[in-house]
Structure formats: C-alpha cells, structure tokens
Image (cartoon, rainbow, N blue to C red):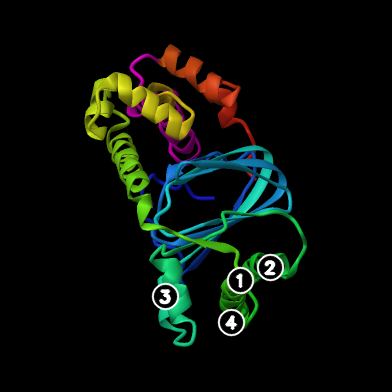
C-alpha cells in the first residue's frame, strides 16, 4: 500500500475508472494507517488479525471477515495487529454523476447527509458477498472487470439503502465538526513541518487553544499525547524513506526531525520493535 498522507493528494485510479486497490501486510513500511482524510470514499476488509479503526471521534475494532466504510472527507486512521487488510478507494461523486437513477441517493452519501454504517461484522450476508466480489475482482486484470467493479459498488449502496445501514446526520453535529476542523489543522501542520522543531505551543496555537487544554483535547480525540503522535508520525515517515530511498540512517533521521541519531534509533525501536538497520533487512511483501 502506498503511503497515505494526512490530506491525501494522490489521485486514485484513472479519470475513466476512479477506483484504486491496496493490499497491506505486516512487513509493509506503511502497515499502520496514520490519521488522514481524502475526498474519496473507502472500503476496508480485514483478511487476517485485527484492526483498531478510528474515524472522526469514534473507535471500533474490525476483525478477519469484517468490513469498514469510510465516507468522503472523514478523518480516519488505524492500528493493525497481526493483520492483513485491503482497501478500495473510489470517487463516489463520479459514480453518482454517471447514474441518473441513483444520483439522488448517492448524493446524500456524497454530502454526508446520511452516514453509512462504519463497521459491518462478518455475517456472510448479501452485502458481504457483494463486497467480497468487489475486492476479488480488483485483483484481476481480465476484460470486463471495470463493469463488474462498478456494478458491485452500485449494489453495495443499493443494499445499504434497502436495509437502512445508515443514519441521517442531524444539524446539531456542528460542534463536533468544529472539533474535527481544529484537529485537521493540527495534522496539516504536522504533515507540512514534521521535519522542523515543532513544539507543544506550536501545535496548540494552530488549534486555537492553550497548551494545557489542547493536550486534553488531543488525547481525547486520538488516544495519544501530541508529542507522542508527532514522534510516531516522524517514525512512519522514516520507515517509508528507509525502503524507498538511498539515504543513510543519519540522513533520514535528520530529515524526519531528529537531531540525534541515537535518540532516533531509540524512538524507532519504541514504535517498531527493532532498530532502523534491522528494519531495513526485513523482506517486503
């Protein structure tokens, strides 16, 4: 799975077929899903192990056979445990435009007027069979796959509306929206300046809060302290650079905001369980 930035700027799929598929194993440098958001919707299926998913301010566990749905613009991330998982990211706006009959219903999902259920446990019902067909077809390169995939996406949303697997979003959710905007601003700062000497005061100022209140707010929303998350994010960036560049460990440490290589190695081991050099020797899958 290619690395997903906080505000993912990557275009998924092609103009004619805006759907992208990712397969993630424990040996991948972007195994953990850092907080991010994108304008596309996303389906996630767990093939093995467990995945602790956070979406907006909610947290839930998905296990082998379960599915998760991420709506457009939702801030989300996840921590896998002995997990193999797959993601399909797709442009629902493009699907809605090309289907006049379903445009009204799909438009409610696009605008977040309705919120599709975040988690679908492994019940092996029609919805799961539809999504399994979708994922399995994404692996193929045979002629006609685009039609099967597009049809499966329409079937998925048809099943969601038929069985009322959604909730209508009340206007009273504005306060929570404001909190998410504050959190997005902080993640934007970290994404842009993680290599700099960011302080707690810098992060709190971006959220428009004093440092003490900001620490409580950030930990409530992410279950991490601000500095812990900053270091975690830096290590995730370092993992990607270790396996995709020819830079030395020292150069990567400096480019990821660590002025002391020894501290970088210690922090790396804290989050990854091994040193940067041992991490480099891991086989990629």
Q: Disc 3 marks which residue?
A: 94
Task: Name the side, left or right, on which 113 lies relative to 150.
Answer: left
Q: Position of residue 96 (x, y in %)?
A: 44, 78
The magenta span reads: 232-260
The answer to whether the residues at label 2 and label 1 have Cβ atoms under 8 Å apart is yes
Q: Position of residue 126 (x, y in %)?
A: 73, 70
Tell me: residue 207, above or below residue 74.
Answer: above
Mark 1 or mark 3, whichever is nearer to me: 1
Task: Name the side, left or right, on which 128 lies relative to 199.
Answer: right
Dot 4 falls on a residue whose secondary structure is helix
Question: Of marks 1 and 4, which one's residue comes earlier in the chain?
Answer: 4
Q: Disc 1 marks which residue?
A: 156
Q: Disc 4 marks which residue?
A: 147
Question: Of marks 2 and 3, which one's residue comes earlier in the chain?
Answer: 3
Question: Of marks 2 and 1, which one's residue comes earlier in the chain?
Answer: 2
**Could you tell me which quadrant the C terminus lies in?**
top right
Q: Position of residue 118 (x, y in %)?
A: 56, 54
Q: CA distance from mark 2 to mark 3?
A: 22 Å
Dot 1 falls on a residue whose secondary structure is helix
Q: What's the mark number on residue 127? A: 2
The answer to whether the residues at label 3 and label 4 have Cβ atoms under 8 Å apart is no
Residue at image coords 46%, 28%: 232
């Amino acid at each position: 799975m290619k690395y997903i930035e906080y505000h993912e700027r990557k275009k998924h799929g092609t103009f004619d077929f805006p759907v992208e598929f990712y397969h993630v194993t424990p040996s991948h440098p972007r195994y953990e899903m850092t907080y991010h958001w994108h304008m596309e919707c996303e389906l996630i299926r767990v093939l093995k192990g467990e995945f602790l998913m956070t979406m907006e301010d909610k947290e839930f566990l998905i296990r082998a056979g379960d599915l998760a749905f991420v709506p457009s613009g939702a801030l989300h991330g996840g921590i896998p445990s002995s997990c193999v998982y797959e993601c399909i990211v797709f442009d629902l706006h493009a699907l809605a435009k090309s289907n006049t009959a379903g445009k009204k219903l799909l438009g409610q999902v696009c605008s977040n007027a309705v919120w599709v259920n975040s988690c679908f446990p492994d019940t092996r019902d029609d919805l799961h069979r539809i999504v399994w067909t979708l994922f399995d077809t994404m692996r193929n390169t045979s002629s006609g796959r685009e039609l099967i995939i597009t049809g499966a996406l329409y079937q998925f949303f048809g099943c969601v509306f038929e069985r009322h697997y959604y909730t209508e979003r009340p206007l009273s959710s504005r306060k929570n929206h404001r909190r998410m905007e504050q959190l997005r601003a902080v993640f934007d700062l970290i994404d842009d300046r993680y290599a700099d000497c960011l302080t707690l005061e810098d992060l709190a100022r971006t959220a428009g809060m004093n440092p003490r209140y900001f620490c409580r707010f950030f930990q409530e929303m992410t279950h991490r302290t601000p500095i812990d998350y900053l270091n975690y994010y830096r290590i995730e960036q370092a993992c990607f650079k270790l396996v995709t560049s020819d830079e030395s460990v020292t150069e990567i440490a400096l480019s990821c905001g660590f002025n002391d290589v020894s501290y970088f190695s210690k922090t790396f081991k804290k989050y990854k369980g091994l040193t940067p050099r041992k991490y480099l020797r891991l086989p990629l899958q």
